[in-house]
Image (cartoon, rainbow, N blue to C red):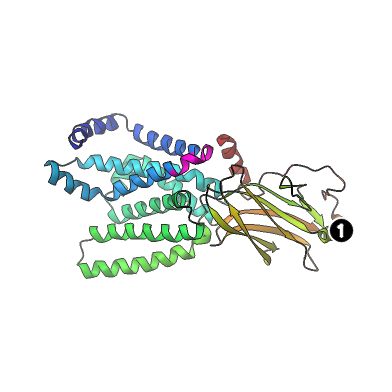
Amino acid sequence: MFKFLSDLAPKVIALSDRFPWAIPLFGFGSGIASFLLVERKQEFAQIIAALILASWCWLLLEKNMHRLVWRWFGFQLPQPLFAYAAQLVHQESLFFVIPFFFITTAWNSGQAIYTSVLMAAAVISIVDPIYFRGLVPRRTWYFTFHGLTLFAVLLTALPIIFHLPTAKSYLWSLAIALLVTLAGVFSESSWRWWKRGLLVVTLAAVFGIAGLWARPWIPPATLWLTEVAITHSVDDVNRAPENNLKTLSQSDLQKGLYAYTSIHAPRGLNERIYHVWLLNGKLVDKVPLDINGGREAGYRAWSHKVNFPENSIGRWQIHVVTEANQLIGILRFTVAASAAAENVIDSSSVAPTPPSEPVTPDAAIKTPLMNLIE
């Protein structure tokens, strides 16, 4: 088997030199195909995520593989074989996770920075001159790139495979990515061991604290809104909102309001989320809700608010967040003075209307991609 790989490697490398676009195209296509399979068939989710993690395990054992092949079979696998394999794993991983983050990112928040960095990393992985000449020789930057990609993969894979809640998945992903990155930096450094150890401990503390601080800026990869509404009533039988309100008068609040959300989550995942009610940016209420993953159209849950401030006029937002304060999406409505509330949609005066698409900052970006998936 190893002899076969040794003979095959030069041919693969020659083909990649002749058709340099082939490997990036394969990485892009396989990543997107994996995402679409996960979305269309929940039973494929664990298999695909496990295969991607397995490819990372193989990649992390690169040096051990060299030693074992030499010891057992008496020859060395070509170094370019592992270089191209590493590039392919990076491409496959990034193009698998980016659609998840693309959908869940609130593009007018700090989350846009993280997702943009992932997209830039994907571009680097498919441009050979940048990847092999600019990134790979600079080992510190290479291991940082390595850790960033692994972090994104774990954020996506752990909830799917092990059904870990988002908060725990984040901590495990951060710890594993830091361990892998710093182990690489330690092994490649030419400093004395105690200087390397001090450097690794310092970097672990700095990046660990930074990772925890930046948690609200990281989108929850496997959670997103599929349907939302602000309504006066919810049909308990169909678990659906009766209408969708955009503008209300203060007197309308006496009827109470429901914030209705349908949240996509992987099968088997049990997650606590929160509806955070804000008036003109100030916290008014925070309501916990428990959701269960697996329903294709999303788990339907709502918070019911009946007590409002005496002066409730202004712009309202309901932030849908995880326990770790990662933003899933935002619902919006406006409370106007009674004289100006001419555009109020009321269930007593009009027939029920279907709920709209999620009123999130990224609705204009999310909708085309979701339509493509469907």
Can you see residue 67?
yes
* Mark 1, other Cα within 10 Å: few <14 / some 14–19 / many ≥20: some
Quarter occupied by residue 185: bottom left
Residue depicted at 28% across the width and 54% down the height: 139
Across and down, in percent, residue 328 comes to: 58, 54
In the image, residue 44 lies in the stretch drawn in magenta? yes
The quarter of the rendered structure image containing the C terminus is: top right
Up the image or down, 167 lies above or below 105; here it is below
Give the labeled residue for mark 1.
Answer: 338
Residue depicted at 48% across the width and 37% down the height: 37
Q: Amino acid at mark 1?
A: Ser
Quarter occupied by residue 321: bottom right
Q: Nearer the viewer, residue 144 or 153?
A: 153
Across and down, in percent, residue 122 comes to: 41, 44
Q: Main secondary structure of the magenta part?
A: helix
The magenta stretch spans which residues? 38-46
Across and down, in percent, residue 361 comes to: 62, 50
Q: Nearer the viewer, residue 254 or 85?
A: 254
Local SS, label 1: helix
Report the side of 122 relative to 87 (left or right). right
Residue depicted at 81% across the width and 60% down the height: 253
